[in-house]
Amino acid sequence: MTGVATSLSGLRVFAVEDETLIAMMLEIMLEELGCKVMGVAGTLPRALAQIETMDIDAAILDVNIGGEKVYPVADALAVRGVPFLFCTGYAATGIAEPYRARIVLDKPYSKTALANALAPLAGKHPER
């Protein structure tokens, strides 16, 4: 196992992704990296409800969920101190100004790109 993959082992990850095939691919990649997938939400209301009760270390947020921006979920995670990254099929410049300092993973992404994007988040959660 590589150093990056080792640092991700056991990382509890939540994902917000509305494209079923991408969500399935993401779950497989996360599991192969040793992460524990705590859930995947395909709508903003479901994501907001799930993070209320979930114990997670990091989150991956697709920027556009069913035509809506994922920023309310990002804000809720920030309040809880949960680190997150954005993924998007559009340029990172499409991220709203208050969120531009966050890591952005461009779609389509490889498992290596996912691991490299997640690695900085693994050490940021207070419980890790």
Image (tube, helix red, strand yellow):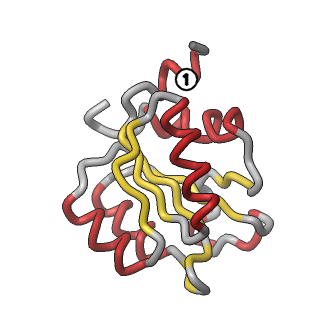
Residue type at mark 1 is: Ala
Q: Is residue 38 above or below residue 121?
A: below
Residue beneath the point at 57% across and 15% down: 3
Q: Position of residue 7 (x, y in %)?
A: 48, 23
Say which of 42 and 82 sits in front. 42
Number of residue marks: 1
Q: Which residue is mark 1?
A: 5
Residue beneath the point at 45% across and 67% down: 74
Say which of 36 and 119 sits in front. 36
- In the picture, the quarter occupied by the N terminus is top right
Q: Is residue 46 above or below residue 113?
A: below
Q: Quadrant of residue 110?
A: top right
- In the picture, the quarter occupied by the C terminus is top left
Q: Is residue 68 above or below residue 119?
A: below
Q: Position of residue 17 (x, y in %)?
A: 54, 65
Q: Position of residue 84 (x, y in %)?
A: 48, 53
Q: Residue furthest bottom?
A: 67
SS at circle 1: helix
Q: Position of residue 119 (x, y in %)?
A: 55, 33
Q: Residue furthest right?
A: 91
Is residue 53 found left or right of 79 in the rendered image? left
